[in-house]
Image: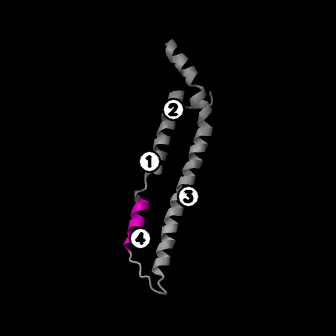
Amino acid sequence: MSDSIFTISELKQNYNTIIRLLSDVQADHDHMQKSLDLLERFPAQNVPGDIAGQAKANATMEIVKSRENTNQKLIDAYMKMYDDLKEVVFDNTDKEEIADGEN
């Protein structure tokens, strides 16, 4: 712990801030929904040789794949943060509470 430039309290605050920001990204589906809504406005022709339907399906697939990629990166970030901070933030909680109680 002596290598850290942050106090336990600061690390916890930083950890909570990062969690909040990642949660905001995770909860933000507006751009994806707007894209899907826009695609829905294009009428389907249902005639032989209509490539608009296929293009619409491909665009929808790419939107969903992009969001899933974002979700996978969020999971990776959460796991990395947890691994990096769990010992510092969680294992030192008791020590900090004892030190605070002594003052």
Q: CA distance from mark 2 to mark 4?
A: 43 Å
User: For the image shown, how many numbered marks are present on the structure?
Assistant: 4
Label annotation for residue 24? 1
Amino acid under label 3? Answer: Asn
Does 23 appear above or below 100?
A: below
Give the left or right position of residue 46, taking residue 86 as reference.
left
Tell us which disc is closer to us: 2 or 4.
4
Q: CA distance from mark 1 to mark 2?
A: 18 Å
Tell us which disc is closer to us: 4 or 3.
4
Q: CA distance from mark 4 to mark 1?
A: 25 Å
**Residue in the image at 57% along x and 21% along y:** 94
Q: Residues within 10 Å of mark 3 (few under 14, many from 20)?
A: few
- Dot 2: element: helix
**Residue in the image at 49% along x and 41% along y:** 19
Amino acid under label 1? Answer: Asp
Residue 36 picture quarter: bottom left
Residue beneath disc 3: 69
Q: Main secondary structure of the magenta part?
A: helix
Whether residue 9 is visible here, answered yes or no, is yes
Residue 1 picture quarter: top right
Amino acid under label 4? Answer: Leu
Camera-side residue: 68 or 53? 53
Residue beneath disc 4: 39
Residue extent of the magenta highlight: 31-41
**Residue in the image at 58% along x and 20% along y:** 95
Tell us which disc is closer to us: 1 or 2.
1
Give the mark nearer the N terminus: 3 vs 2: 2
